Amino acid sequence: MLNQRSMTFLFLAAYKTMTDDAIQAYADAHSEPEPPLLHALWRETHLQLLMPRMATGHWQGRLLSMFSHLLKPIRVLEIGTFTGYATLCLERVSLHVGDARDVLLTLVGEVWDLVFIDADKINNGRYFELVVRQVRPGGLLIVDNVLWGGKALLDYPLKANDHDTKAVRAFNEQVRTDSRVVPLLLPVRDGLLLLRRV
């Protein structure tokens, strides 16, 4: 049986979800429409793959596209991809197949205007260290999933074997005080961390 406190919590959680959904629908309706190719990719992702929520999606895709159009990057590097939705939003992405840690070692000397990191969270810090010196001053690194479903918050109870959450928290702290970048965490979807290269 639910007590008053539990009922209040459930009501607030349902209200927050409803409000968040309504706000997201409003934001989608008042943003650039999703291009037909991306809509088809989104639909196929939801019909064919497990965990389709991993796909970037309309609003975040339009945000990535906006960054790409504002920066006008010549060289873009995406580390990690699911179905390529974000890749299509960023444009001009260099494709290299393999373990990102190994591939990045072959790209030493490259200069990047924009880097999007959306791979295994345990290695965010490694990926960052491998590419940060190669991002031009004024360039942008974008790291996805830095809120990690809310688990990045320090008051979230952490399980001893939750290595991904530990890595996300450590990475967020690492770049917060890194003098090579200026951070801005956007609390959209699962968190986008913008890092402007100094």
Image: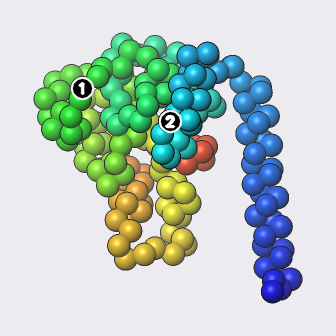
Q: Nearer the viewer, residue 113 or 163?
A: 163
Going by the picture, which residue comes out furthest to the right? 4
In the displayed structure image, the side of residue 17 where residue 95 appears, left or right? left
> Is disc 2 surrounded by few (<14), some (14 to 19) or many (20+) residues within 10 Å?
few
Going by the picture, which residue comes out furthest to the front? 48
Residue 96 numbered tag: 1
Q: Residue at x 21, y 34 (%)?
A: 98
| Element under disc 1 | loop
Task: Locate residue 119, reporting x and y percent.
Answer: 35, 43
Q: Residue at x 39, y 25 (%)?
A: 114
**Residue 162, above or below 81:** below
> Is disc 1 surrounded by few (<14), some (14 to 19) or many (20+) residues within 10 Å?
some
Residue 189 seen by the camera: yes
**Residue 145, above or below 74:** below
Which residue is tagged 2?
A: 48
Q: Nearer the viewer, residue 28 or 48?
A: 48
Q: Amino acid at mark 1?
A: His
